[in-house]
Image (cartoon, helix red, strand yellow):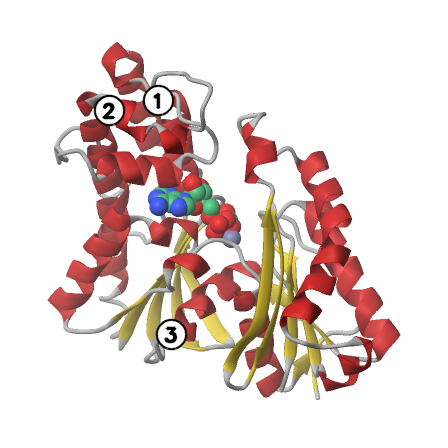
């Protein structure tokens, strides 16, 4: 079973080929540097870039996999991210996938981007089911009960900002460019965390939802009161002059990331009282964070179950995870027809597949 995966939900255009043995080829183009000029993703620009890049990227994918035009008949499914994401960006990928499916008579499968993130964890280690899934990305923070690769139930989610958004806003207020999460991580590694500096918001309740807006406000307020915690402006890229950050900023970054991580682990541990997971899966862009990885490793060890987490290269948006999710959907006999719709952020992904 060979599956072509297509991802274009936000600011990465990506394509991948996954077969029964794993990844055959993968290409990705990030628009982060373009959006950094505006301090965040500009939806209109993102859609235009996807439309410009997606065709040439398909050529590179085929070259990488050593496939020619006659090889379409070896591709069994076309899997595409249908949501959640930016509507214009999603439509580029969905329309492209439909054209390929129609031209080459290949069944189409629409993929939930968030479930794709969780399945990226499976590319290096087997997930033990049922698993507790923690999806932490720029736009989403969801807890899942994962009974199988195509059987996931949302247990809780953020009621306002996502964990990644909270990191990016703090980084921006500290003078770092968008998206600042990874830069904040690099600074935090040089700092000492004060566990009392920032709150663990919305944890004194008995639900499984998150709220990061209070932490974000506390962080931004603290930065506004500490002039020495600002990253100095300069002409060279921030990642090349991280050494110029003050110790105050590095310590604040470490403290902030600890607050984000513990807010996540407190609710995850609460979810473990609902059922007994055999493993914990943490995925999404924020799963690349070193403090998040360490705190979840501690939690998993405390409960004597494995932590399954994607390699750093597959934490952020990519098409390997979409192709892998498509592979599982194909194994379950699920397909979509050409009326497949794109679903924007905030709306539930419908279970409108057909079973072969
Ligand atoms: O999953 P992703 O690539 O895109 C979405 O689907 O949102 O996640 C992007 C988010 C951004 O907020 C980015 O700053 C954050 O992941 N991120 C990190 C790190 N690497 C990426 N946050 C904290 N530490 C990191 N090392
Ligand atoms: Zn994502």
Which quadrant, please, contains the N terminus? bottom right
Residue 218 occupies quadrant: top left
Determine which residue is flagged by label 1.
174
Q: Which mark is residue 282?
A: none
Q: Residues within 10 Å of mark 3 (few under 14, many from 20)?
A: few
Could you say where residue 189 lies in the image, as x and y percent from the top left?
21, 40
- The residue positioned 60% from the left and 41% from the top of the image is 31
Compared with 281, 204 (above or below) is: above
Residue 317 x %, y % = 52, 54
Direction from residue 322 to residue 108 in the image, left or right: right
Q: Which residue is mark 3?
A: 124
How far separated are the C-alphas under marks 2 and 3?
35 Å
Label count reads 3
Q: Are marks 1 and 3 in contact (CB under 8 Å)?
A: no
* Circle 2/circle 1 CB separation < 8 Å: yes
Q: Which residue is mark 2?
A: 249
Give how far across and how far down residue 327 sits, in percent.
58, 79
In which quadrant of the rendered view does residue 315 lie? bottom left
């Amino acid at each position: 079973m060979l599956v072509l995966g297509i991802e274009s939900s936000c600011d990465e255009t990506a394509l991948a080929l996954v077969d029964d043995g794993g990844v055959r080829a993968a290409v990705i183009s990030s628009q982060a540097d373009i959006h950094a000029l505006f301090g965040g993703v500009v939806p209109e620009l993102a859609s235009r870039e996807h439309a410009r890049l997606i065709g040439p990227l398909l050529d590179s994918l085929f070259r990488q996999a050593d496939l020619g035009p006659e090889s379409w008949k070896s591709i069994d499914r076309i899997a595409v991210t249908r949501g959640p994401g930016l509507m214009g960006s999603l439509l580029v990928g969905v329309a492209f996938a439909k054209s390929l499916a129609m031209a080459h008579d290949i069944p189409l499968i629409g993929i939930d981007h968030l479930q794709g993130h969780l399945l990226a964890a499976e590319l290096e280690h087997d997930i033990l089911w049922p698993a507790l899934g923690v999806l932490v990305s720029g736009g989403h923070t969801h807890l899942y009960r994962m009974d199988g690769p195509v059987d996931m139930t949302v247990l809780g989610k953020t009621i306002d900002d996502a964990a990644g958004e909270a990191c990016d806003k703090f980084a921006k207020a500290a003078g770092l460019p968008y998206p600042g999460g990874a830069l904040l991580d690099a600074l935090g590694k040089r700092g000492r965390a004060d566990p009392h500096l920032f709150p663990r918001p919305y944890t004194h309740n008995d639900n499984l939802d998150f709220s990061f807006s209070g932490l974000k406000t506390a962080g931004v307020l603290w930065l506004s009161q500490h002039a020495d915690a600002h990253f100095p402006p300069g002409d060279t890229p921030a990642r090349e002059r991280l050494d110029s950050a003050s110790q105050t900023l590095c310590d604040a970054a470490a403290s902030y990331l600890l607050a984000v991580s513990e807010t996540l682990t407190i609710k995850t541990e609460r979810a473990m009282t609902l059922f007994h997971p055999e493993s914990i899966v943490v995925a999404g862009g924020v799963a690349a964070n070193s403090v998040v990885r360490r705190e979840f490793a501690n939690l998993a060890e405390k409960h004597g179950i494995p932590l399954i987490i994607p390699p750093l290269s597959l934490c952020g948006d990519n098409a390997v995870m979409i192709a892998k999710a498509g592979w599982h959907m194909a194994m379950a006999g699920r397909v979509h027809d050409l009326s497949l719709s794109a679903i924007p952020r905030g709306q539930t992904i419908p279970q409108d597949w057909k079973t072969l």
